């Protein structure tokens, strides 16, 4: 089976990015697929017109939206998402983008159901546990303690202890020597300030610091300094959550093949105090 993954519409927040990725996927997996054949399939006479729609150089109309919806065999929820995604991508007013964005994120969350882990503190007690659990979801890997020891470069004792901890949460079970996941997706409840969760993030940041020693092609560090008010802080937090959902949907593959496990961390924190407001004084000079 091909390891290529068809782009999942409901993981995108840009109509151009989705259509460009869809074109690349079909180009790689379907013989003789071109913009010309795609235009004919959609009922669009001009291939250049289709190319401009995909790249964002030409705006969608209700008629062109309907062409895609009718010809792409979308489910009812996908049709709604496609329509909203076009409107979101074309919106210029921030109020409109925010309104469309909220609806898109609601549909995103509905399309990617996750089992909530309880007690979550046991899963986040080590940064190793979620990584091993993620590894066990792939279809083309050997799911034994020995292979996990090798993949994560840990001792056999650590591998067995980790597997038993995850098993106690009901997320995996042992079949002979093979570990099998009992959930396709899971999430840890977000409790702001929770001591166990904060401890997990602390360990994750220490892992990131240690990753400075890794080869440059296996790591990236980026920093951004922003001035935010309280509403903007909440807004950027929403954007971060939306980005994570989009990346999860876009890169949620079934096959490990030529891949490695990576961890993406976000940390957003205050780095200064707020300036004091001083009203200008009116003065009269004599």
Image: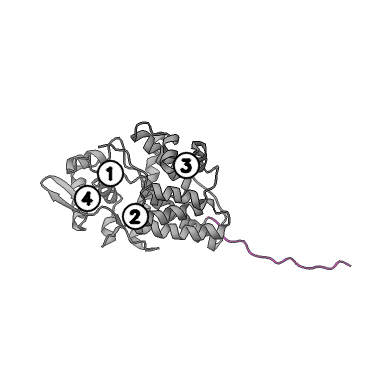
Residue occupied by mark 2: 200
**Tag in front: 1 or 2:** 1
Residue carrying label 1: 254
Numbered disc 4: secondary structure: helix
Q: Is residue 15 above or below residue 286?
A: above
Marks 4 & 1, CB-CB < 8 Å contact: no
- Which is closer to the viewer, label 4 or label 1? 1
Q: Which residue corresponds to the image point at 31% horizontal and 44% vertical from the top-left? A: 253
- Say whether disc 1 or disc 3 marks the residue closer to the N-terminus: 3
Q: Nearer the viewer, residue 175 or 130?
A: 175
Q: Nearer the viewer, residue 132 or 23?
A: 23
Q: CA distance from mark 4 to mark 2?
A: 15 Å
Q: Which mark is residue 44?
A: 3
- Neighbour class for label 1 at 10 Å: few (<14), some, many (≥20)? few
Q: Secondary structure at mark 3?
A: loop
Residue 221 appears in which quarter of the rendering?
Answer: top left
Residue at the right extreme of this rendering: 286
Characterize the local packing of mark 4: few (<14), some (14-19) or many (20 or more) Cα atoms within 10 angstroms: many
Q: Quadrant of the C terminus?
A: bottom right
**Is tag 4's residue or tag 2's residue first in the polypeptide sequence?**
4
Residue 89: give x, y in percent of width and height. Answer: 51, 51
Residue 265 shows up from this direction = no
Residue that numbered label 4 is attached to: 162
* Residue 27 seen in this snapshot: yes
Q: Is residue 280 magenta?
A: yes
Q: Which residues are magenta?
A: 271-286
Foreground: disc 3 or disc 4: 3
Figure colour scheme: one colour
First reached walking from the N terminus: tag 4 or tag 1: 4
Q: Position of residue 229 (x, y in %)?
A: 56, 61
């Amino acid at each position: 089976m091909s390891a290529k993954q068809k782009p999942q519409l409901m993981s995108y927040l840009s109509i151009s990015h989705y259509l460009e990725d869809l074109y690349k996927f079909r180009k790689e997996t379907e013989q003789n697929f071109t913009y010309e054949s795609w235009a004919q399939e959609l009922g669009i006479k001009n291939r250049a017109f289709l190319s401009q729609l995909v790249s964002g150089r030409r705006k969608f109309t209700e008629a062109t939206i309907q062409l895609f919806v009718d010809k792409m065999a979308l489910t009812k929820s996908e049709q709604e998402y496609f329509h909203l995604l076009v409107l979101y991508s074309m919106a210029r007013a921030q109020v409109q983008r925010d309104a469309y964005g909220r609806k898109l994120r609601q549909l995103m969350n509905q399309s990617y159901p996750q089992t909530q882990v309880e007690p979550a503190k046991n899963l986040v007690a080590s940064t190793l546990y979620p990584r091993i659990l993620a590894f066990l979801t792939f279809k083309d890997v050997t799911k034994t303690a020995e292979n996990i020891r090798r993949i994560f470069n840990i001792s056999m004792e650590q591998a067995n202890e980790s597997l038993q901890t995850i098993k106690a949460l009901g997320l995996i079970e042992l079949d002979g020597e093979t570990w099998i996941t009992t959930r396709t997706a899971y999430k840890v409840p977000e409790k702001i300030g929770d001591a166990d969760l904060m401890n997990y993030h602390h360990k994750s940041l220490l892992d990131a610091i240690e990753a400075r020693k890794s080869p440059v092609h296996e790591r990236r560090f980026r920093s951004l300094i922003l001035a935010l008010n309280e509403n903007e802080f909440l807004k950027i937090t929403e954007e971060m959550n939306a980005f994570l959902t989009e990346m999860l949907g876009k890169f949620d593959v079934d096959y490990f093949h030529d891949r490695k496990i990576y961890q993406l961390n976000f940390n957003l924190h205050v780095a200064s105090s707020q300036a004091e407001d001083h009203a200008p004084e009116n003065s009269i000079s004599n």
